[in-house]
Image (cartoon, rainbow, N blue to C red):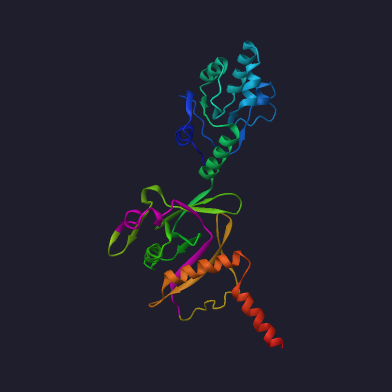
Amino acid sequence: MEKVSVETLIKDLNLEVIVEAENNKIDITTSDVNRPGLQFAGFYEHFAYERVQIMGKVETTFVEQLPDEVLAERADKFFAYPIPCLIVTRDLNIRQEIIEAAKKHDRYLLRTKEASTKFINRLINYLDEKLAPQITIHGNLVDVYGIGVLLLGESGIGKSETALELVKRGHRLVADDAVEIRKIGEDKLQGSAPEIIRHFIEIRGIGILDVKTLYGVGSVRNSMSIDLVIQLEEWDEDKYYDRLGLEDEYIKFLDVEVPKLTIPVRPGRNLAIIVEVAAMNHRQKQMGYNAAHELNKKLLKQIGN
């Protein structure tokens, strides 16, 4: 199961630590959040304690009205559950009874200056990305005309050289050699490079190149959706290659299907131009126009006449 530590959350979202858990740290395993107004009112049936707990203005206003002894009792019961953390938004005041209960049960108590709705939206997006199912595959990922093109193929087939030529033509490199693929939502994949090799590319005979330094910040990006997969393979005279594009082929990653093209490689073929055209053709298909189907309709109409 993917998980995020509260320490990482604090660092990435710039949260203020009011109480730090020392020996009872619990990782975050879901992107859902819970607003514990009902719990501070004394209702604990179906309490989603495994979620990040968020106290906004409504919950804080309610808590402010509770007598000291009542709040102390309810805060003690609340923090007795194994919650990852409680985050108070809007930089609101936190009553001492809540602070003491957090210390007693060794739970994280945090605070942010952001408004509740804005912070919750940012938190969920952050956790969705961090907790998304992930795999790492051998390949190159390039942003071509806003289409995320994943290049696959055996080592030495020319993936990196093709990616570099695309960068020279004004497109952007996302990952070379290793691509981390995350499932974002039900049917969307996002690719990125491992941080240690981000923006670097390996060209046999030359070595490691820093694309960002050579071509500028506009030549790279940190992540990109995976919209199209292009499989590069050695030209096989005995193999049939689709020349019309009437049949769609797909490849599956993390149970998500992505359109796939197989491009045979032989001397004289300009792979960068082929990838560009493939990306533009994919965009046309997304907009509802399929050149192969249009030509087929015209041929069938002519035959019928």
- The residue sitting at 53% across, 16% down in the picture is 100
Residue 50 showing in the rendered view: no
Exactly how many numbered labels are in the figure? 0
In which quarter of the view is residue 245 placed? bottom right
The front one of 297 and 156 is 297
The front one of 184 and 82 is 184
The front one of 214 and 206 is 214
- Residue 210: in magenta span: yes
In which quarter of the view is residue 294 placed? bottom right
User: x and y percent of residue 35 in the render?
Assistant: 63, 30
User: x and y percent of residue 252 in the render?
Assistant: 56, 60
User: x and y percent of residue 240 in the render?
Assistant: 52, 79
- Looking at the image, is 52 positioned above or below residue 227? above
- The residue sitting at 60% across, 76% down in the picture is 292
Residue interval drawn in magenta = 208-236
Report the residue that reaches farthest toward the right.
305
- Residue 225: in magenta span: yes
